[in-house]
Image: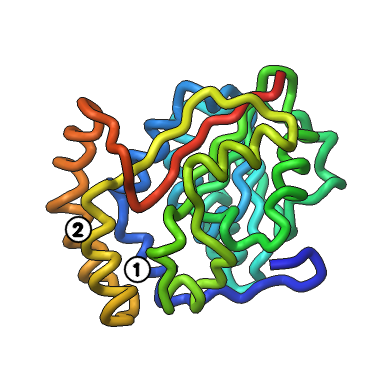
């Protein structure tokens, strides 16, 4: 995704991901200690995660969504919360002045061709001691036809993402792999079988597997996983 065209994301896959309620709540809960009071959410989509973030007591949420077909859903979802400002645009250098406590990218950075420049945008917009909160798909060997359809330029390794974050001037607070069990169904369904993402499979995994996986990973962080979660800090 470049900054000269507004994307049109596949609606069916995004609708399916809206059923991952427990999964998204898990991510937001992991980010909670670093949210602060003012937050920029990049790639807010249909607003389901935005509402979870607002439930954490934010005073202001800047919800950026560049997709022309997704933005009306976001605007409608957040219209009754005066703390939320929806923006139908890319999160670019012209928003560096907003000065937020945190910038969050949940399954977004992989859509951006120049991820280094994007993280510099995040750094510029952060207040001192603010945080960049990243959640991305992991491991190049898990890259599938579905990744390509969704517009993913890459999947990340924890080490590579950490190096990138340091190179743009952020320090690492926390980095870990996430959802160890999810690698298995992802590899079978989307790498081997090249299936599409369906709401039934997402909902089933979210309801039956995610609560147990969350408890287990809360006790023992996995050495490998389907995603990488990283907290970076502006110093």
* Category of crowding for the residue at label 1, using alpha-carbon neighbours closer than 10 angstroms: few (below 14), some (14–19), many (at least 20): some
Coordinates of residue 27 in the picture (x, y in percent) = 39, 40
Residue that carries the numbered disc 2 in the rendered image: 205
The residue under the point 45% across, 27% down is 32
- Quadrant in the picture for residue 183: bottom left
The residue under the point 56% across, 45% down is 160
Vertical position of residue 209 compared to residue 122: above or below: below
SS at circle 1: helix
- Which residue is nearer to you in this view: 131 or 95? 131
Coordinates of residue 68 in the picture (x, y in percent) = 66, 71
Vertical position of residue 135 compared to residue 101: above or below: below
Residue 16 is labelled as 1
- State left or right for residue 26 relative to residue 64: left
Q: What sort of colour scheme is used for the picture?
A: rainbow
Coordinates of residue 234 in the picture (x, y in percent) = 69, 24
Coordinates of residue 99 in the picture (x, y in percent) = 77, 29
């Amino acid at each position: 995704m470049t900054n000269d065209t507004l994307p049109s994301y596949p609606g069916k896959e995004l609708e399916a991901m809206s059923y991952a309620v427990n999964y998204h709540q898990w991510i937001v809960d992991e980010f909670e200690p670093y949210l602060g009071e003012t937050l920029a959410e990049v790639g807010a989509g249909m607003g389901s995660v935005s509402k979870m973030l607002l439930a954490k007591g934010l005073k202001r949420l800047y919800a950026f969504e560049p997709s022309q077909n997704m933005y009306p859903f976001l605007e409608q979802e957040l219209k009754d919360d005066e703390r939320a400002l929806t923006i139908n645009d890319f999160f670019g250098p012209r928003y560096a002045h907003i000065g937020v406590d945190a910038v969050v990218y949940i399954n977004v950075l992989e859509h951006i061709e120049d991820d280094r420049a994007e993280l510099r945008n995040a750094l510029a917009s952060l207040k001192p001691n603010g945080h960049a909160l990243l959640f991305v798909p992991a491991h190049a060997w898990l890259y599938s036809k579905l990744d390509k359809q969704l517009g993913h330029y890459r999947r990340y390794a924890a080490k590579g993402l950490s190096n990138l974050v340091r190179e743009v001037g952020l320090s690492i607070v926390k980095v870990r792999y996430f959802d160890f069990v999810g690698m298995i169904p992802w590899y079978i369904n989307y790498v081997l079988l090249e299936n599409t993402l369906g709401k039934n499979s997402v909902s089933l995994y979210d309801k039956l597997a995610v609560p147990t996986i969350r408890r287990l990973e809360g006790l023992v962080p996995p050495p490998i996983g389907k995603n990488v979660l990283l907290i970076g800090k502006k110093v």
